[in-house]
Every structure is written in C-alpha cells, then in structure tokens.
Amino acid sequence: MDSESRTMPSSTPKNTTRRGRLLKYGGGGIILLGVLYSGGWYYLANELENRVATNIAAFKEKGIDATCENATASGFPLRVGLDCTKVGWADPAKNLSVTAGTFRSAAQIYDPLQIVSRIDGPAAINVPGIMPLDAKWDNLTSSIRLDKPLPKQIEIEGSNVIVNQRNAAPGDAPVAVVQEGELHFATQDPQMDVVLSFNKLKIADNVIYDRPLPELTGVADVQLANGFALLGKPERDLTVLRGQSGTLRRVDVAFDDGSGIGISGPFSIADDGRVSGDFKVTMRNPEGVAKALQGIFPEAGNTIASVLQAMAFVPKDETGAPTLPITVKKGKMSVGFINIGRLPAL
C-alpha cells in the first residue's frame, strides 16, 4: 500500500497535463471549424447577392424590369436565403407587370436544392385583356425542389386571398375571393403532373360571361405524358395543349350544398385542337347540380330539367351517385351510340 500511494501522486500531473492539451487542441479545432464555416457561409451569402444583382442586370438588358429591393442574404448559421423589401417583374413588351411586398427565401445548408419562400402583399397586377388588379392575402408561400434543366417540384399555397379591381369604390365586391388555394407541379422528364385545388372560391357575378357564379370548391389533378414540351412553346392560351395526351386523374367541382360533378379518364388533343378521350362523369346530388346550373344558365332551364330526369335511369357508383361513361372522338361526344354534342376545338 505504501509503494502504490507513493507512485500515484507522481502520475497525476502527467494525466492532468495530457487532458489539458486535449481540451486545448479540441477547443482550438472547434473554433477553427467555426471560423471556416462562418467564412464559407458569408462567402456563399456574398455570391448569392452578387448572383441576384447579375441576373437583374441581365433581365434589364432584355427589356424586363426585375426588382428585388435591398437584396440581403440571411439565415446564418443553419440556412442561407435571400430577403427583399419589395419584388417586382415588368415586361413592357407584353404589357405585363406584377409587384408585391417583402420576399423571404431560405434553404437548409444540408439541403440547398430545397428552397422555401414567403411573399407578403399587397400586390399590383397588370395583365393584358383584363382590368388592373390589386391582391392581398394572409399567407402566400412556395417550395421549390431545384433540378436540371427545370425544377423537379414546385408547390404554391395561399390562404384568404382577395382580388380587387384597382381603384374600386369602397362598396364594390371583390373580383375574386378564395379561402385556400394550392398549386403543385411535379416533373419527371417528359412527364408532368399538375394539381390545382381551391376551397371556397367566389368570383364576382358578371365577371365571366356576364353570369352569376356560386361559391365553388374544386380540384384538378392532371398528368401530362409530355408536359415538358409545353415549356418551350410560345403560346399563352389553350392552344399550347395541342399535341398533348394524358390522364384526368381527378377533376371535381363542388357547390356549397355538397353537390358536384367529377370527371376522370385518359385524353388526347390533336394538332387541330380536337379532343378525344374516354371519360367517366359522376354527378353527386343531381338535384343540387341542376339548381346551381339553372342559376348560371337560366335560358337552358328546360334542357337541364330534362337531363335531371334522365339521370334517374343512369347507372350508379358505389356511393349511389349517377355515373356516365362518355366517349369523345375528335370532339364528338357520345354515350354509347347516342350523340350528345360536340366539344369546341382548343
């Protein structure tokens, strides 16, 4: 015991010194990593700000006035993003412009290709063919998964969006109001999936074809077999869909009483704009649908009433809703051997 007690004090200072050196080197290494990380983050932030300035200058050379006022990198230490006090896009050649408020975007350092952003209103919108509009909202966000040559996924979500005619009188109704809306794109060359959904959409009466329109809730889930081809086309109307084919996985519109119409099935669009396809059309609560349609098209009241009577003899799906198989060949619609009309060319 005496021998062991004499050797222990002599080894303790060595162990203490070794631990001290390890702590010193470890602490120094952590500080060095922190300095290198911070330097790398600020380098990326500076590159981001420079890239934004370069891109804006390039747009201006093309006659497009892109705006990102007071562009500043943000998000240190775990994210990197861009903040702007005001954003805008104006293309005088097309008479198109949009301006909005604060813009914030960010990507996690460990996943830089996934970018989320938020934009604040109000927004001023000028589009050819319609009156100047102002829009405001409670929340408007987006999420983008970057890829080459195009983003792999884009998601846009908004809530309590109100669109007004610019300089509208205080008592004028909004042009459109939607409680919730979402738009999703997903691409896998050459295929493109597009999903649009909205909840409690009310468009002001007489805005579309001078018709009163009820409040609507709906979804359109469409898969395009060659959606990538759309991105290179100059058309800005429905003619851009010529030559496309795909599937209506679900297209559904519902009225405020729960009645509604759903359509699904494969389709194709010829080069002359004629539509062909095999569709299944389902009508939930036919009486409610008929009442809503008669409110929109009062001149077609007798026709709508006749269709309603015929729905009593139509096969039902598992929920009891009348379901019709409709075949369309080059725009001509038929149920079995009975022709029921013709779709206009796109």
Image: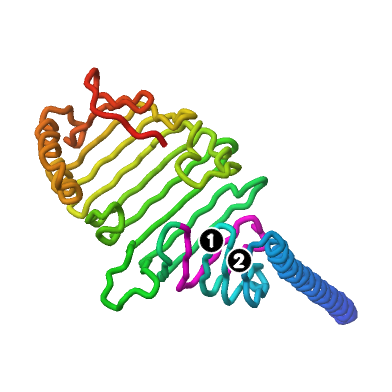
Q: Which residue is mark 2?
A: 106
Q: Position of residue 43 (x, y in %)?
A: 78, 70
Residue 7 at least partly seen: no
Q: Which residue is mark 1?
A: 95
Relative horizontal placement of residue 76, taking residue 122 as reference (left or right): right
Element type at mark 1: loop
The answer to the question of whether label 2 and label 1 lie on touching residues, with beta carbons closer than 8 A, is: no
Mark 2 or 1: the one toward you: 1
In the image, 3 versus 56, the foreground residue is 56
Tell me if mark 1 has few (under 14), some (14-19) or many (20+) residues whose alpha carbon lies within 10 angstroms of its own: few
Q: Quadrant of the C terminus?
A: top left
Magenta extent? 104-128
Name the main secondary structure of what is drawn in magenta. Answer: strand
Which residue corresponds to the image point at 16% horizontal and 28% vertical from the top-left?
A: 314
Which residue corresponds to the image point at 55% horizontal and 41% vertical from the top-left?
A: 230
In the image, 194 versus 168, the foreground residue is 168
Q: Position of residue 7 (x, y in %)?
A: 89, 77
Where residue 188 sits, quadrant-wise, is top right
Disc on res. 50: none
Q: As shown in the figure, which amino acid type bears the numbered disc 2?
A: Ala
Relative horizontal placement of residue 4, taking residue 271 as reference (left or right): right
Which residue corresponds to the image point at 14% horizontal and 37% vertical from the top-left?
A: 303
Looking at the image, residue 156 lies above or below residue 286: below
Q: Earlier in the sequence, mark 2 or mark 1?
A: 1
Looking at the image, residue 338 lies above or below residue 108: above
Q: Position of residue 103 (x, y in %)?
A: 56, 71
Colour scheme shown: rainbow
